[in-house]
């Protein structure tokens, strides 16, 4: 057996805890049954079991997953585990399934009453759908909670109880989002093999008319798989196993393609459809750039190594050391360049822009470059401990405070975001000058740090 999984089983599944869980849950179910009318006992017990499952897997389970590695660091046992012979895959299964084994043990007692309640209402397909929904969403939430903690560890952040709560909240937000977008009734229809012709809702994605139930189910499983890949990649890095940016590149391409496919349901085919697809792809790449630069550790030593490898012509080695924000920015650059060089924008108005849409996209790209430079500038300061916080405050001033101070003057507002009424040349020049200035300052700080 996986040594880490077995170790967590011995820690979590003690004889006393194994006996306590069914006793407590049994008392809860008996209390509900005693107060329920004779005709509705099964439904009431099923609802009680569902709420117990929510607590065990969604709330307690995400908390345990968020603290699986953070607790090891707090107890000063993580360094010993990193030096062990455990593989990243063994560590992932040990932390994700071993640390939460007690919560899943309790969930096993909740699932039979839930299944009975679903069986009495909707038959076998609804029962199977309900169980699949609960298992998938629970595991997804716990995986995201673990992923959030590993991101913080990768940033070399201190791990306090409040921080673990924030990682747990990431898992809970994931659960709530997945629950609102995907309901067990969709899976029930899929299992029953019903098609769109018999009343199942459908959506158009990349020109294909897909059943809504199957699309939601496959999407949930795919994103669950990506969360596991993310956990595995970060654990490989923590265990000093050489990593590759390939998984992140594949995830970015998948995310861009996945989101751009929804344009089919928002506009008709033709020029407008291509416009919307490109806009969605650029927006997704931009959001990924901001998310990556905010969550990654900005390491001056790594940047010096990258510059040195590029200078020596070792592009393959430099590629292996690229951070996620760099790859997302490269993808964004390629999409914007494609838009400007090969795409003819529509003549009709888009967000207030008509013939200035290409200039607005280029200006927006320069603003992203400027914002990335702001993050680097504050993180390259000597003994910078809260560089990301300072960068967020600076961006808040740039995007909120100063535009209000500039009033409605288009020339002044162009310093902070693209303005339809502004001069196209000034719309481009303003963010380009800002980006050039902040990158110059950031690189000078980096050189000053590396000379010490």
Image (spheres, grey):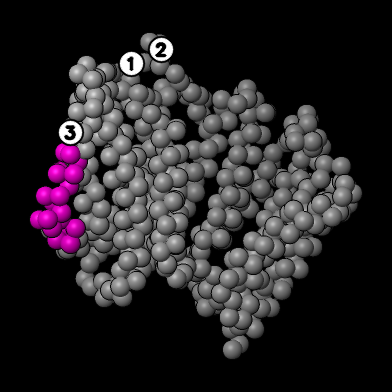
Find the distance from the CA under tag 1 to the CA under tag 3.
38 Å
> Which residue is at a point 56% across and 25% down the rendered structure image?
265
Upstream in the sequence, badge 1 or badge 3? 3
Circle 1 SS class = loop
Upstream in the sequence, badge 2 or badge 1? 1
Q: Quadrant of the N terminus?
A: bottom left
Task: Name which quarter of the figure residue 356 lies in.
Answer: top right
Residue lying furthest front: 35
- In the image, the segment drawn in magenta is 9-27
CB within 8 Å, label 2 to label 1 = yes
Task: Name which quarter of the figure residue 6 lies in.
Answer: bottom left
Above or below residue 380? Residue 330 is above
Across and down, in percent, residue 288 comes to 55, 51
Q: Is residue 127 magenta?
A: no
> Which residue is at a point 84% across and 55% down the rendered structure image?
405
Reading the image, the residue beneath label 2 is 199
Reading the image, the residue beneath label 3 is 30
Q: Nearer the viewer, residue 146 or 354?
A: 146
Reading the image, the residue beneath label 1 is 194
């Amino acid at each position: 057996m996986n040594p880490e999984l077995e170790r967590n089983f011995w820690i979590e599944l003690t004889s006393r805890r194994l006996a306590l869980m069914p006793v407590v849950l049994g008392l809860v179910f008996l209390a509900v049954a005693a107060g329920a009318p004779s005709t509705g006992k099964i439904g009431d017990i099923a609802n009680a079991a569902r709420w117990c499952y929510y607590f065990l897997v969604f709330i307690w389970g995400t908390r345990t997953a968020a603290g699986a590695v953070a607790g090891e660091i707090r107890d000063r046992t993580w360094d010993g585990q990193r030096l062990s012979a455990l593989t990243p895959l063994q560590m992932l299964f040990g932390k994700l399934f071993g640390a939460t084994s007690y919560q899943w043990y309790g969930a096993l007692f909740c699932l039979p009453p839930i299944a009975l309640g679903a069986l009495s209402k909707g038959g076998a397909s609804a029962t199977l759908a309900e169980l699949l929904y609960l298992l998938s969403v629970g595991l997804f939430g716990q995986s995201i909670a673990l992923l959030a903690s590993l991101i913080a560890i990768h940033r070399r952040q201190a791990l306090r109880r409040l921080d673990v709560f924030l990682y747990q909240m990431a898992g809970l937000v994931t659960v709530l989002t997945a629950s609102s977008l995907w309901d067990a009734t969709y899976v029930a229809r899929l299992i029953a093999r019903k098609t769109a012709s018999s009343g199942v809702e459908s959506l158009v994605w990349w020109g294909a008319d897909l059943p809504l139930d199957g699309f939601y189910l496959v999407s949930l499983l795919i994103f669950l798989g990506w969360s596991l890949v993310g956990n595995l990649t970060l654990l490989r890095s923590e265990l000093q196993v050489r990593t590759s940016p390939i998984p992140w590149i594949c995830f970015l391409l998948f995310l861009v393609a996945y989101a751009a496919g929804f344009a089919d349901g928002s506009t008709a085919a033709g020029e407008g459809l291509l416009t919307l697809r490109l806009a969605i792809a650029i927006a997704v790449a931009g959001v990924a750039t901001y998310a990556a630069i905010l969550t990654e550790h900005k390491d001056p030593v790594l940047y010096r190594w990258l510059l040195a490898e590029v200078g020596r012509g070792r592009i393959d080695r430099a590629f292996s050391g690229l951070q996620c924000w760099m790859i997302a920015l490269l993808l964004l650059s390629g999409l914007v360049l494609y838009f400007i060089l090969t795409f003819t924008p529509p003549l009709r108005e888009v967000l207030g822009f008509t013939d200035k849409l290409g200039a607005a996209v280029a200006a927006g790209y320069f603003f992203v470059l400027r914002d990335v430079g702001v993050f680097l500038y504050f993180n390259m300061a000597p003994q910078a401990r809260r560089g990301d916080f300072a960068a967020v405050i600076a961006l808040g001033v740039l995007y909120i405070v100063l535009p209000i101070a500039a009033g409605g003057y288009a020339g002044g507002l162009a310093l902070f975001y693209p303005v339809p009424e502004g001069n196209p040349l000034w719309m481009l020049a303003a963010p380009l000058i800002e980006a050039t200035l902040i990158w110059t300052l950031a690189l000078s700080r980096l050189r000053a740090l590396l000379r010490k």
